[in-house]
Every structure is written in structure tokens, then in C-alpha cells.
Amino acid sequence: MADEQNWARDKADFVAHAADPNNASSNSSRSPLAVEFAALTRALLDASTVADVLEQVVHAALRLVPGADLVSITLRSPDGAFHTPVETAPVAAELDQMQYRTGEGPCVEAARASGPGYVRSDDLAHEPAWPTFGPVAAEYGYTAVLSTTLLPDIRLPRLSGSLNIYSQRPGAFHDQSGETALLLATHASLALAGTQAVVLGQLREAQLHQALASRDVIGQAKGILMHRRGISADEAFDQLRRSSQDMNVKLGDLAATLATRHTELD
């Protein structure tokens, strides 16, 4: 009960202070959990690719979830195949692959589109649900596991997955561990929204294509402004940037609107 009360207090503290991450006096009174999540949020905002976000999430899970010794992310492609694009150590990918081969285990269950959303085992060596995977994982030295579903897209064919956290201590995970994992899984799900990439190379490539497409449409918008207003490329970009800030619209979205609807706009 005390742990749950501490967790509830930490969550409330994080929400109360998240809007002011640079306030030193505020930071000094904040709980470690609130400080960690604020730092994670800033790191995720600075991440340049989907793969970078996922790597930030797995390493944050290693720091934030008590008892965590290994962390990985499972992604399930539309054809049903499972992949592990990021992990904190190679043995995590081995444990995941074992589940993919046998078709049983927490990350497989949590990553299925019809999965339970949250899977936990406190004693893998004697887990009746996974008679093949459980004992082998225990032989590797990992006796507890927590997997939380990722649901980045509700459209079909839906890309699904899971955030997987392994521990060498039986019974290492509690209710607050699941709450932390859920917050981290939400970050990962948001990062994955809009991509069907399932392996690390595809994730980086998908983000690169998105960046190139955005740069291309910004170039088109700049050309339109240069032609209409007789200004330089730098001046055109500066006008786009200022308008984006004034209208609170992403620069890429504003440029796309101008490029596709310029005949309708003054």
C-alpha cells in the first residue's frame, strides 16, 4: 500500500511540474520518478528518428522500472512475423527470439492484436502458461518478466508490439512497475504511429523518407513564396518559420498546405 501511495504521489508530482522542466527550485523538490520522466520527455523531443525514440524508451525502462535487468521491444508486422528492433543487451533479443520460434511467451501474447495488454510472470521457471519458454528463460538467469502492449495504430493491417522487461529476481515487478511500463509503452506507441516499419533498418529508413519528403515540400513552398513575393530563399524560409510559430502549425504541415493549395491562397 505504501508503494502504491508513493507511486500515486510521484505521478501527481510529475504532472504538476512537467510544464516547467527548467525551474531549478522546482526540480530540487521533485521526486526521482518525476525528474526521470521529465528528462525522458526532453530526450524524446530531441530524438531525430523513430529508432532513436525506441532506444531512449528501452534504456529509460532499465532505469525507471525497479528490478529491470533487460529490456526489449517487440514489433509484429502485418504478416504476423515478430521482430526485436531494439534491446538493451543481445540476450534480450535471444529471449524474444525463443518466444517467436515457439509461439509462446509474454512478448508474443502482449504483441498479438487481440492480446491482453499487460502480461506478467513472477516465476518463469514454474510458469504453467509457458512450459517451453519459462524454464529456458530461467536457465538464462531471468526469472520474472513484464510485457506491455504497444498499439501505435488502430488501422488495419495494424502494427502491434510490446515493451518487454526481464528481471533476474523472482517477483521483482509490482503494480507500479506496470504503471511505469504503460507510460513508457505510450511514448513508444506514439513514436511508431504512422509507420509500418518493424525492424531497426526500416525504422531508420522510414524516418529518413519522412524527413526527405518534408524537406521537399518545404522547398516547394519556399519556391512559391520566392516567385510570388520576389524574395530570397532565406527570406521565404523565415516567413514560413514565423507563420508556423504564429499559427501554432508544424512547419511541414504549413508548407504542404501552401504547396498543394497555393492557387486558392492569397
Image (cartoon, rainbow, N blue to C red):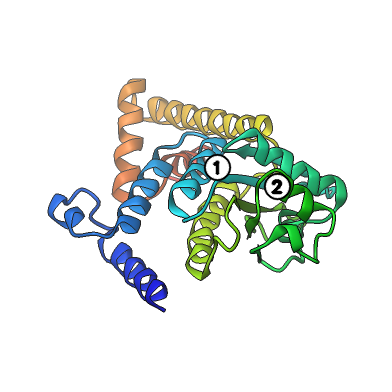
Rendered residue at 32%/43% (across/down): 243
Q: Is residue 198 visible?
A: no
Residue 170 position, x and y percent, is 60, 59
Task: Give the label on residue 75, or none.
Answer: 2
Q: Residue furthest top?
A: 232
Q: Nearer the viewer, residue 196 or 17?
A: 17
Q: Secondary structure at mark 2?
A: strand
- Residues packed near mark 2 inside 10 Å, few (<14), some (14 to 19) or many (20 plus): many
Q: Is residue 3 visible?
A: yes
Residue 114 position, x and y percent, is 77, 66
Task: Give the label on residue 130, or none.
Answer: none
Q: Which residue is mark 1?
A: 54
Residue type at mark 1?
Leu
Q: Secondary structure at mark 1?
A: helix
Tell me how far mark 1 sits from mark 2, CA to CA.
11 Å
Residue 132 position, x and y percent, is 84, 54
Image quarter in which the C terminus is found: top left
The number of callouts visible is: 2
- Residues packed near mark 1 inside 10 Å, few (<14), some (14 to 19) or many (20 plus): many
Q: Nearer the viewer, residue 140 or 86?
A: 140
Instruction: Say if 102 sits above or below 235 in the image.
Output: below
Instruction: Say if 13 sits above or below 196 in the image.
Output: below
In the image, is 3 to the left or to the right of 215?
left
Residue type at mark 2?
Leu
Rendered residue at 62%/38% (across/down): 86
In the image, is 148 to the left or to the right of 29?
right
Image quarter in which the N terminus is found: bottom left
In the image, is 226 to the left or to the right of 155?
left
